[in-house]
Amino acid sequence: MKTLLALLCCLLSILPLPVTAQQEMEIIPLRNRTVDQVMPIIRPLVEPGGALSGMNNQLILRASRKNRDEIKQALAAIDTPARTLVIRVTQNRDAAMNRSGAEAFGSVGNDHVRVTQSPTGVAAGGGTVVIRRGDSVVGGQVVETRSTRTASAAQSVQVVEGGKAFINVGQSVPLPMRQVVVGPGGAIVTDSVVYRDIGQGFYAEPRLAGDRVTLEISPQFDTPGNTGYGSANTQRLSTTVSGRIGEWIELGGSGQQAAGSNRGNLSVGTSDVRDNRSVWLLVEEVK
């Protein structure tokens, strides 16, 4: 019995072990997608000992027949025509300022005693009433103003799935610039003009998964300022959002509100300033 077992062990030791399925090389052409788009998805599907490379819109695959069939089946679902998208972005600004004030001023008295109250400017620009009697003058001024300012910008750009989009429209504003360089011979002053771009637009990179879209987007909304030459009101946003195709997505917004008052002996003034901004996004598929 022991002799028979020893003979069996000897025979097993000299028999070849089972070999894996034979691997062969195959070139698979890509019809719609590029090698860079497909390789990261297909590479994990290659069996141990196999190899995958690509060039000139072709995959070069070395694997067993079964593994090659599995990879070609996966490619059928991946190598489809890229979907064309339209990205729309709207940016809105709603600003309002309310200002009111009232004051009394004048000069009352005689040659010996006189009381004078000069205008403080709290109600400058409003309606004025002045009463004179002899050398005395008494006046009053009342102002109430309301101003609103709305601005909006809407841009749209077409991009294929997996691509990057950028659009910007606006104007370049000249800004004076002075440079002073101090050297051995003294200071050298150079005056020049630089241009600052003021516009509205966005940068976006969409990725699709069924009827949902994920975007990396950075919109900007610049308008000329009213505080001086070359000033600008700016709005910046950078975010990643996800939503359904065909639905508006709120990217974000900002709101500012300030109130103030000014009181004097014969004057009172109040002001209220509000500034709200919002940004919305819509992605549609071009059929």
Image: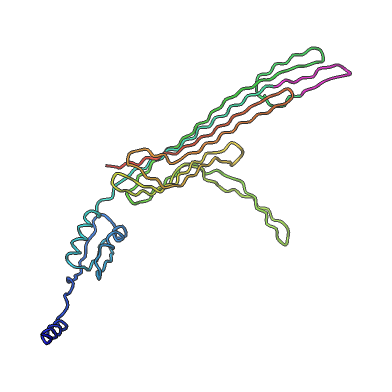
Residue 108's x, y, as percent? Answer: 81, 17
| Residue drawn 61% across the image and 40% down it | 229
Quadrant for residue 138, please give it: top right
Residue nearer the viewer, 14 or 181:
14
Residues 9 and 268: in front is: 9
* Drawn side of residue 160 relative to residue 180, left or right: left
In the image, 98 versus 21, the foreground residue is 21
| Part of the protein shown in magenta | 103-117
Q: Is residue 87 magenta?
A: no
Residue 218: x %, y % from top left: 45, 46
Label total for image: 0
Of 54 and 170, the residue lying toward us: 54
Image vertical order of residue 206 relative to residue 126, above or below: below
Q: Is residue 114 left or right of residue 240?
A: right
Q: Where 170 falls versus 263 (above or below)? A: below
Q: How is the image coloured?
A: rainbow
Residue occupying the far top of the picture:
133
Q: Is residue 7 left or right of residue 257?
A: left
Residue shown at 66%/20% (left/top)?
142
Residue in the image at 44% along x and 39% along y: 279
Q: Quadrant of residue 156?
A: top left
Residue 115 is covered by the magenta coloring: yes
**Quadrant of the image occupied by residue 41:** bottom left
- Split into 4 quadrants, where in the image is the C terminus? top left
